[in-house]
Image (cartoon, coloured by chain):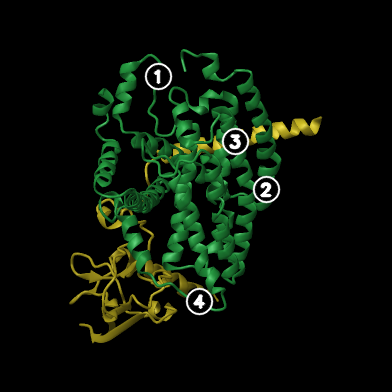
């Protein structure tokens, strides 16, 4: 009862009210149809809005790292800069390339955007704000997010451009390698959490985040997941598929207008998706900070809406990604593959065994200090 | 065995150097921003004195300049930017003398090479750092540098003395030869 009043800003009431209102007036089929469409529209809107906010934040933080101001002319502190950019990119001409494979050329951006959209749907943004919640959620996310690489390879191949082709091939090698590490890092946490469903994972992290619960093993998995996540999104020190000094823009060199916008959007959203999956799996997702025995404190924490918690945690990780991006020089392709196959993968395999031992012998924090965590 | 040691020491050294790099960028994040916001900061803007933006001919309070209309600057200009027009007048004692009539300089043709200022024997022209020279029509770029009604500054007597001294030396040398 208290909880009902303590969460005035949650979307729970709105969603339940809408559902009952629809169900009272029409049949099951139409209710589901309307709700599916509403969820899809909501996700698409969130997708583009988050992308715009990310682009603005990225430009601003990048500027601060380089002792500049960043965009500060369009509106106060330049907050309308990315809106203006979006309008510009929508109005731009789509240039048709001679002697390119037209069908694949136009299909490639959709692969990118659909892959990132499918993953986007599986992210738990807050309490009840979770569109796709499979019991194999982690597996689903890993599988679906790797579809994006098809778009990159198609774009590189169909552009009939050597730069695009080299960029796409590099991206392919990089993605296939680092997908392995990311998968194993998530697997380590699946061993710890004992479930693949995101909602159950979050529930299990109510009092102790997975990052701390599996202490040493979890920390290693977290770092490895962040590294391979950055590599998968072609960002940070791993941006050699689009190394502008060597390949102009890599696989999307020949794209313009809305199609380029799709690639751009997908790139930014992939950064967000990596950060939010790391949040969900390692940092307790939308769950507020809860401590055993401190009921008032827990209650106060619940006053803050769950999506605020989620976006705050994700924001910290995105900031970390930008920090890394502007600290380190770009890796060469052989260094990149060395890092994955000679360091991350062996460490990861050992780490998964260590995690199994920790879980089986009861060395997790929840097992060691049952009252505290 | 040593290779295993190398593997792990390399790994930890790498992590350490990455963390050092991140601490450097973290400090950089909080440093003062160096961007000059130009149109707003006109009052505090610092442009180097040596910056060459506009050719000027300094006039003193009596509206007098130092240009003798010798035309050396015009001859030295690689682009034909400078055009010195002189007039001939008759002085009180009946001598004919060349004086400056109009001194025009075309900003649009100038490469700011500074040759005119270097070669000027009487330091009559110099480059200023006033850089806001944009105009809408090309004809406005052609400027007349000498002011209306200005005249040549009479040289102070000290310098004339030294000149006569030096000419005396030269005549002596010629006699010795």
Mark 4 — on which chain does it sit? B
Classed neighbour count for the residue bearing mark 2: other residues with Cα under 10 Å, few (<14), some (14–19), many (≥20)? some
Co-location on one chain, circles 1 and 4: no
Disc with the residue nearer the chain's start (2 vs 3): 3
A310 relative to A267 in the view: left or right? left
Classed neighbour count for the residue bearing mark 1: other residues with Cα under 10 Å, few (<14), some (14–19), many (≥20)? some
Classed neighbour count for the residue bearing mark 4: other residues with Cα under 10 Å, few (<14), some (14–19), many (≥20)? few
Q: Residue at x 50, y 14 (%)?
A: A370
Marker disc for residue B174: 4
Between marks 2 and 3 in the image, the one whose residue lies nearer the viewer: 3
Between marks 1 and 4 in the image, the one whose residue lies nearer the viewer: 1
Residue under numbered circle 3: A187
Mark 3 — on which chain does it sit? A
The secondary structure type at the circle numbered 1 is loop
Marker disc for residue A337: 2
The secondary structure type at the circle numbered 3 is helix
User: What is the letter of the yellow chain?
Assistant: B
User: Is A146 rendered above or below residue A351?
Assistant: below
Co-location on one chain, circles 4 and 3: no
Q: Colour of chain A?
A: green
Mark 1 — on which chain does it sit? A
The secondary structure type at the circle numbered 2 is helix
Co-location on one chain, circles 2 and 3: yes
Between marks 4 and 2 in the image, the one whose residue lies nearer the viewer: 2
Classed neighbour count for the residue bearing mark 3: other residues with Cα under 10 Å, few (<14), some (14–19), many (≥20)? many
Q: Quadrant of residue B4?
A: top right
**Real-space CA distance between mark 2 and mark 1, rounded to the nearest whole angstrom:** 42 Å
Residue under numbered circle 1: A291
């Amino acid at each position: 009862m208290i909880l009902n009043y303590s969460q005035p800003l949650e979307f729970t009431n709105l969603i339940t009210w809408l559902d009952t209102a629809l169900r009272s007036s029409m049949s099951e089929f139409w209710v589901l149809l309307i709700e599916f469409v509403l969820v899809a529209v909501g996700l698409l809107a969130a997708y583009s809005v988050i992308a715009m906010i990310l682009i603005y934040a990225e430009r601003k933080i990048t500027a601060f790292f380089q002792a500049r101001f960043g965009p500060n002319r369009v509106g106060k502190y330049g907050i309308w800069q990315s809106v203006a950019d979006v309008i510009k990119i929508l109005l731009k001409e789509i240039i048709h390339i001679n002697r390119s494979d037209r069908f694949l050329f136009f299909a490639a951006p959709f692969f990118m955007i659909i892959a990132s959209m499918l993953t986007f749907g599986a992210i738990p943004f807050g309490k009840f704000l979770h569109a796709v919640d499979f019991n194999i959620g982690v597996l689903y996310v890993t599988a679906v997010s790797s579809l994006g690489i098809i778009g990159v390879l198609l774009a590189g191949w169909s552009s009939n451009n050597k730069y695009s082709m080299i960029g796409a091939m590099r991206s392919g090698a990089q993605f296939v390698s680092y997908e392995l590490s990311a998968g194993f890092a998530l697997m380590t946490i699946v061993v710890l959490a004992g479930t693949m469903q995101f909602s159950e994972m979050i529930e299990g992290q109510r009092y102790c985040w997975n990052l701390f619960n599996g202490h040493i093993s979890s920390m290693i998995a977290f770092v490895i997941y962040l590294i391979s996540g950055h590599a998968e999104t072609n960002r940070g020190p791993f941006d050699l598929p689009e190394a502008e000094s060597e390949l102009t823009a890599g696989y999307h060199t020949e794209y313009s207008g809305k199609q380029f916008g799709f690639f751009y959007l997908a790139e930014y959203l992939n950064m967000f998706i990596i950060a939010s999956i790391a949040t969900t799996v390692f940092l307790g997702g939308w769950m507020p900070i809860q401590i055993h025995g401190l009921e008032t404190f827990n209650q106060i924490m619940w006053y803050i809406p769950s999506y605020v918690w989620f976006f705050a945690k994700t924001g910290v990780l995105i900031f970390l990604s930008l920090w890394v991006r502007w600290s380190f020089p770009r890796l060469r392709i052989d260094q990149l593959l060395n890092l994955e196959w000679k360091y991350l993968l062996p460490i990861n395999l050992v780490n998964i065994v260590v995690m199994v031992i920790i879980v089986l012998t009861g060395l997790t924090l929840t097992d060691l200090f049952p009252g505290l965590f | 065995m040593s290779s295993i040691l190398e593997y792990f020491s390399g790994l930890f050294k790498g992590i350490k150097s990455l963390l050092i790099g991140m601490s450097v960028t973290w400090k950089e994040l909080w440093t003062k921003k160096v961007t000059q916001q130009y149109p707003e900061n006109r009052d505090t803007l610092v442009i180097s004195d040596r910056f060459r933006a506009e050719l000027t001919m300094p006039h003193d309070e009596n509206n007098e300049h130092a240009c003798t209309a010798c035309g050396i600057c015009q001859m030295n200009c690689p682009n034909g930017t400078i055009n010195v027009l002189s007039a001939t007048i008759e002085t009180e004692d009946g001598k004919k003398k060349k004086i400056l009539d109009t001194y025009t300089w075309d900003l649009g043709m100038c490469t700011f090479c500074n040759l005119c200022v270097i070669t000027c024997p009487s330091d009559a022209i110099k480059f200023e750092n006033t850089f806001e020279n944009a105009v809408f029509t090309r004809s406005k770029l052609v400027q007349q540098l000498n002011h209306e009604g200005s005249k040549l500054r009479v040289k102070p007597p000290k310098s004339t003395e030294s000149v006569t001294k030096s000419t005396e030396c030269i005549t002596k040398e010629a006699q010795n030869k």
